Structure formats: structure tokens, C-alpha cells
Image (tube, rainbow, N blue to C red):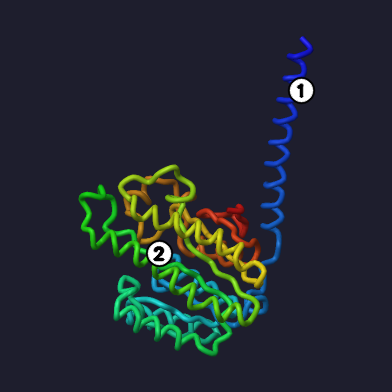
Amino acid sequence: MALTAWCFFWLACVGAFHVAALCFRLLAYLLLCLRRPKDLRRRYGAWAVVTGPTSGIGRSISLGLARRGLNLVLVGRDAAKLRDVSETISSTHCVQTKTVLFDFSHVSTVQGDQAMRRFQEAIQGLEVGMLVNNAAVVKPGALFVHEAAVESLARIIRVNVLALTQVTAAVLPVMVQRGRGTIVNISSASALALPSFPLYSDYAATKRYVGEFSRSLSVEYKSKRIDVQCQVPFLVGTNMISSAVKASFFPFFVPTPESYARAACAGSGTDPCACHTSHPPCSGGLPV
């Protein structure tokens, strides 16, 4: 009987500790919701770099950052769409914009090296305080690996991994020299929240890299006052998910890019290396 009582006592203690830990995390999340958004321009600098800014989450984040007073360097592969988003931002917000034509699928090639030099020239002398690594590709979509063309698999890796790493490496010296900055990497719940993502193996693997890269980068540059976040959208109503998938889920679980971007922008600068799921009700996140 005494042994049974002690076992019950220790199990109760473990359960109480677990409940207390969950309540503490919930309280921290609620406090984060109530916290006023940071002044990103004052905290980090006047300019932000956004990759993949012409549609979906990237476009909405670009507009959200412009609304908060940040000048923008917009990096993408479609000149017409870059011009369109740049003109939209300039006409609706009193900020400056620069555009850099860069097809990330050409990274580590002669064309990619030329584009990287153009990007480095574009940010030279700017007070770049923020980088949003949003550009990514998922095509060819749901396929077994042996059915996909090798070049399409390599393209996913070049865009989602190599380009993200190179752009980050190009921006970091500016932030290190200034002693402040923030990097926001857009990963995916397919890699960090789900146990596996079959038929999208290559894509999920690249997004897993983004999460691990962000964790280590956060520790590596914490002493240099550079914050790193890994934001993890699940289902967001962009062109990357099919209309059938959108229709299969209740709208609450498939937020628009605009609603996701509002939470993402509000959450930037709150937690070093934080993880934001799709459709967060506020700016909170979970540590990764």
C-alpha cells in the first residue's frame, strides 16, 4: 500500500508539473499577443530584403513591412511582377523600393553569380536591418521521387536551400558591422510539424534544412545582436496549395496570405528563433 501511495504521489507530481509547464507556455503566448508590435525600423534598420515578394505570403509580407515604414529591396525572378509590387508599395506607402532580378534556380551558375553581384551592389551602403527568406518552390508537386525529373528535384534544392543560404551569407556582414538585425526564414509545417510528408520528400527535406539552419544561426549570431526566426506556415491560401485542398479545410484553417502576413510581421522581433504556425490569432510563437 505504501509503495502504491508513493507511485501515485510521484505520478501526480509529474502530471502537475506537466500541466504547470503547459499553463506557463500558454500564459507566455497570451502575453506575447498583448504586447505591442516592435518598431522594426528603429530596432533593426531602415531597409528590409524580401525574397519571393511578387505573390502569396511574400507579397503580403512586403506590403506589411512597408506599412510599418520599412524601405524594401525586392528580390525575384519576374521583372514585370517585381515592377508591379514595387509600384503598388510606392503608391500606397511613403517608403523607397529597389528591385533585383534574380532567378534562384540559377544559383551556383554563371547567371546566378551575376545576379548575386547585382544583389550585393543593390544593398551596398543601405542600412539593411531585416531579411525575409521567403522564396521557395514546391513543383513538380505530388510525385514519387523516381517519377520526378532529376532536374526538377535539383531545382527545389537550389531555390529552397542554396539560394537561401547564399542570400543570408550576403546580408549578414552588413548586420554584423552594424551590430543589429533580424533574419526571418519561412519554413513549412510539412517538415517541422508533421512526422513525414510523402510524395513531397524533396520539398519537405529542404524545409527541414531551413529549420535546422535557423536554430544554429540563432545561437551563432545571438552575441552579435542578430535575431533569427523560423516561421512555419501550415496551410495558407497561396498558389502553392491546390484549390481542392483549400476547399477540403474549413476557412479558419486556411488563412489568406494577408492574415498570415499580419501575424508574421507583428511577430517579427519578438522572440529570437520563434516558430509561427499558420493563422496564429496574434503575433505569438513557439520556440524551436
For the point 50% across and 64% down, the residue is: 185
| Mark 2: amino acid | Val
Tag 2 secondary structure: helix
4 lies above or below 242: above
| Mark 1: amino acid | Phe
Query: Which residue is the extreme one toward the front?
Result: 220
For the point 44% across and 81% down, the residue is: 88
Give the quadrant of the N terminus: top right
Q: Is residue 73 left or right of residue 26?
A: left
The residue carrying mark 1 is: 9
For the point 39% across and 73% down, the residue is: 54
Q: Is residue 127 left or right of residue 207?
A: right
The percent position of residue 225, horizontal first and vertical second, equals: 66, 71
The percent position of residue 256, horizontal first and vertical second, equals: 46, 60
Task: Name the one closer to the observer, 106 or 259.
Answer: 106
One can see residue 84 in this view: yes
Q: Is residue 181 left or right of residue 79?
A: right
Tag 1 secondary structure: helix
Q: Earlier in the sequence, mark 1 or mark 2?
A: 1
195 lies above or below 65: above
The residue carrying mark 2 is: 161
Mark 1–mark 2 distance (CA, rounded to whole Å) = 50 Å
Q: Are marks 1 and 2 in contact (CB under 8 Å)?
A: no
Q: Quadrant of residue 163?
A: bottom left
One can see residue 87 in this view: no
